[in-house]
């Protein structure tokens, strides 16, 4: 796993001195300097410029700093998944959850599921929603996490090496700042978006989002499309701060407290469902069959 000296490195970089990092970590400045020296020795290059004026990151240090927090976060998530795998109970289904992969569908269906399968239990496993982490989790469903709820298309399932039980075709709606004039409307007409910046995820992420993009380019050139690479909290922050409209799906209604999802009077939808391993366990298969039964879905 990751070198724990990276945490010390981040503290020193954030606070700008060995002594302040030592105070924050409740260890001596000598111990902090020793850890940084050992880390630099292992890496083979300096992370900090040391001068009478204090510390500053070297170019190599700046590069490491950009990746270190992700490395630590990913490693912790990996360890949590491993611990969950060790504690696996045949009657427990582990549901992965993040802001973009809500587990609300279980809450909504729980009374009906429980009636059909009274011995079935659920464990919620949270994870950091980064492109790398999400991709790794979906490719390894059935190990640390059994199922994840989310939007998909055929290409997405193929690239992530997983399958899905579709629960619904969820409408694509628009997220806007609560201070935006459109936030007061019960529903948005396409003409309401004329003159607005509409943020749509980059082409290739989802066929149905691409269809929306093509429709706007072809029929509604008065709308300015703004590209972004990945759905995360920062995208919602950008939408709220810049006053842009963001194309999202209904299940993401509570991602940002200052952003409201507003329905749009168009026919654009995205499949939403339960993502699972191509070879689900007996208990996961039972859950999928039960959900299909209570929702009257052909599975």
Image (cartoon, helix red, strand yellow):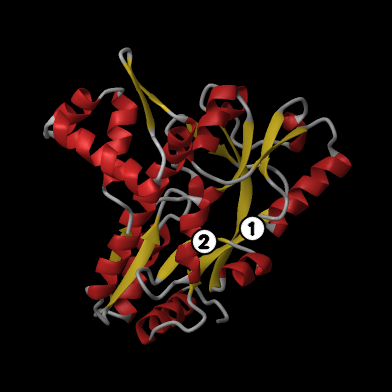
The mark total stands at: 2
Residue at image mark 2? 135
- Residue at (37% x, 68% y) in the render: 145
- The outermost residue toward the bottom is 282
Residue 238 x, y percent position in the rendering: 55, 30
Instruction: Residue 17: tell me if it is visible.
Output: yes
Secondary element type, mark 2: helix
- Residue at (39% x, 78% y) in the render: 287
Kindly report which numbered mark, 1 or 2, lies closer to the viewer in this rendering.
2
Residue 198 x, y percent position in the rendering: 69, 34
Residue 148 x, y percent position in the rendering: 44, 64
126 relative to 48, above or below: below
- Quarter in which the C terminus is drawn: bottom right
Residue at image mark 1? 270
Q: Is residue 80 left or right of residue 96?
A: left
Q: Residues within 10 Å of mark 2 (few under 14, many from 20)?
A: some
21 or 185: nearer the eye?
Answer: 21
Residue 141 x, y percent position in the rendering: 44, 72
- Residue at (39% x, 57% y) in the render: 97
39 or 96: nearer the eye?
Answer: 39
């Amino acid at each position: 796993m990751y070198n724990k000296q990276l945490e010390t490195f981040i503290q020193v970089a954030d606070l700008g001195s060995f002594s302040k990092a030592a105070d924050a970590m409740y260890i001596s400045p000598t111990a902090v300097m020793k850890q940084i020296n050992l880390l630099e020795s292992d890496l083979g290059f300096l992370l900090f410029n040391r001068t009478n004026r204090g510390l500053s990151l070297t170019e190599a240090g700046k590069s490491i700093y950009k990746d270190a927090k992700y490395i630590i976060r990913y490693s912790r998530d990996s360890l949590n998944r491993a611990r969950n795998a060790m504690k696996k109970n045949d009657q427990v289904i582990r549901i992965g959850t993040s802001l973009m992969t809500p587990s609300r569908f279980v809450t909504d269906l729980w009374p009906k599921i429980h009636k059909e399968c009274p011995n079935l239990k659920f464990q919620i496993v949270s994870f950091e929603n980064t492109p790398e982490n999400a991709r790794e989790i979906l490719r390894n469903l059935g190990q640390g996490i059994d199922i994840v709820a989310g939007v998909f298309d055929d290409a997405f399932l193929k690239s992530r090496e997983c399958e899905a039980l579709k629960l619904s075709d969820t409408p694509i709606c628009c997220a806007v700042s609560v201070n935006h004039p459109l936030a007061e409307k019960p529903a948005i007409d396409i003409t309401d978006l004329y003159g607005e910046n509409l943020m749509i995820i980059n082409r290739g992420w989802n066929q149905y989002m691409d269809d929306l993009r093509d429709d706007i380019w072809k029929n509604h050139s008065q709308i300015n499309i703004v590209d972004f690479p990945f759905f995360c909290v920062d995208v919602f922050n950008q939408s709220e701060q810049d006053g842009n409209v963001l194309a999202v799906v209904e299940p993401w209604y509570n991602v940002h407290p200052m952003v409201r999802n507003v329905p749009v009077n168009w026919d654009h939808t995205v499949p939403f469902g339960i993502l699972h391993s191509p070879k689900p366990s007996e208990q996961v298969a039972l859950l999928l069959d039960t959900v299909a039964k209570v929702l009257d879905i052909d599975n």
